[in-house]
Amino acid sequence: MTEVERRPRVALTIGKATTARSLASRRSYVDALERAGAEVVVVEPGDELPADVDALCIAGGPDIAPGRYGESDPGHLAKEPDPPRDELELDAATRAFARDLPVLGICRGFQVLNVARGGKLVLHVDDHEPDDPGGVRAHREVIVRSGSKLAEACGSERLDVNSRHHQAVTEELLGRGLVPTAAVGGLVEAFEATDQRWVLGVQWHPERTAEVSPEARRIFDAFVAAAARTTASAR
């Protein structure tokens, strides 16, 4: 394969796959990115982030340790924090920002991007996390802000999406340079960075393709297209 033909290399940061469910979850991210044309480099806690990637995708997973954004947690509301993964992904986001690489944050990754930008999280909200470990909440006809990168990526101003989280972002807790582009029930469900080429975060799970509208899945195409522009600029 020549340099001109090279697919954009996308680093996918994700937790260690130790169960059948986590393996299936990882596969759904890899499949979505590969369908969009990416070469996926899986990066787990303890791995080094490759220096030659063209973009960064931060996957879903457990809660970020509240101390990472200056909060105590006397009620132990944070579920299964993974300090090595926090370290990996916050560092990866900072490096990607410094290089102006395209970044897509999904669910936990959405929250990581907010924390990496100095934002905070609501420690617990009700009604966005089903009791079923694999379940999600459906949000129908979510309005996307017109003119946003999310609207450009998905080609629609209303999306059917899924959601599974109990920690959240509000407008008051947004990190620097981030603007909300979709909300549900007073909670920010999507944002983008105003000072980067292409940085988007979504609280939902577009990689679970059967649970979202076709338009919502297009975010991977737009993300990989932005990564391809990184590849082209390096030639």
Image: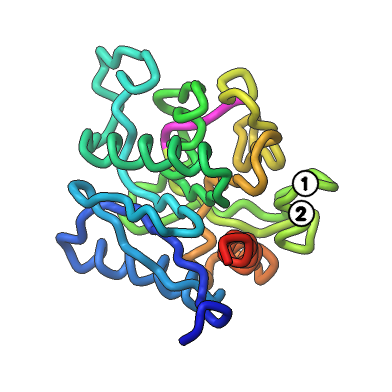
Report which quarter residue 41 is drawn in. bottom left
Residue found at the very far right of the displayed protein:
146
Q: Which residues are magenta?
A: 166-170
Type of colouring: rainbow
Looking at the picture, tell me which residue is in the foreground, 183 or 116: 116
Residue found at the very far left of the displayed protein:
18
* Residue occupying image coordinates x 40% and y 24%: 123
Q: Are marks 1 and 2 in contact (CB under 8 Å)?
A: yes
Residue 64 picture location, percent across and down:
33, 32
The C terminus lies in quadrant = bottom right
Q: How many residues crowd around disc 1 within 10 Å: few (fewer than 14), some, or many (20 or more)?
A: some
Mark 1–mark 2 Cα distance, whole angstroms, equals 5 Å
* Residue occupying image coordinates x 68% and y 34%: 195
Residue 29 picture location, percent across and down:
42, 66
Residue 151: which disc? 2
Identify the residue position indicated by label 1 in the image: 148
User: Compared to 77, does 48 lie above or below?
Assistant: below
Question: Count of labels shown?
Answer: 2
Q: Is residue 51 left or right of residue 178?
A: left
Q: Is residue 168 magenta?
A: yes
User: Compared to 157, does 83 lie above or below?
Assistant: above
User: Compared to 159, does 108 lie above or below?
Assistant: above
Mark 2 element type: helix
Residue 1 picture location, percent across and down:
46, 87
Q: Is residue 50 left or right of residue 174?
A: left
Q: Is residue 88 magenta?
A: no
Mark 1 element type: loop
